[in-house]
Image (cartoon, rainbow, N blue to C red):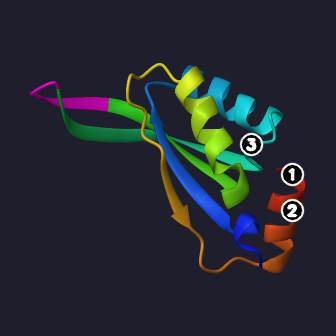
Amino acid sequence: MSTENQLLVVLCTVPDAETAERLANGLVEERLAACVNAISGVKSFYRWEGNLETEAEVQLVIKTRRARFDALADWIHENHPYDVPEIIALPADQASESYLAWVVAET
């Protein structure tokens, strides 16, 4: 597998289901992601501007390939409502060949 076609799983939290749907659709429409899962019911605890915050969020699990990561991150920054959106890419060390081929074809 070439480095550019390495499967990445990108995590990104959003404030609500409407935002999750808008970003997920946009990422897939732009061919920046092959698939996005939106997982409701996430509760996030974090420090922001010196305060401890607790918020209900939706977790996006985005499947893409390394070659598309920079464009995906730029698109999220441009379209996300947060000042500092979570954009964390995790390399998938193992994936079925057929799934990886599908991700490459869709992105």
Front residue (pair 75, 92): 75
Position of 99 with respect to 27 (left or right) is: right
Can residue 22 be seen by looking at this rendering? yes
Label 1: how many Cα within 10 Å (few below 14, some 14–19, many 20+): some
| Magenta span contains residue 50 | yes
Spatial CA span between label 2 and label 3: 13 Å
**Which dot marks residue 102?**
2
Q: Secondary structure at mark 3?
A: loop
Disc 1, disc 2: CB below 8 Å? Answer: yes
Q: Secondary structure at mark 2?
A: helix
Residue labelled with disc 3:
32
Q: Secondary structure at mark 1?
A: helix
Disc 3, disc 1: CB below 8 Å? Answer: no
Residue labelled with disc 1:
106
- The residue positioned 76% from the left and 75% from the top of the image is 2
Can residue 65 be seen by looking at this rendering? no
Front residue (pair 28, 89): 89
Report the amino acid beneath label 2: Trp
Spatial CA span between label 3 and label 1: 8 Å
Q: Position of residue 93 (x, y in %)?
A: 59, 79
- The residue positioned 68% from the left and 66% from the top of the image is 7
Report the amino acid beneath label 3: Leu
Magenta-drawn stretch, dominant element (helix, strand or loop): strand
Spatial CA span between label 1 and label 2: 6 Å
| Magenta span contains residue 5 | no
Tell me the magenta residue range. 49-55
Badge count: 3
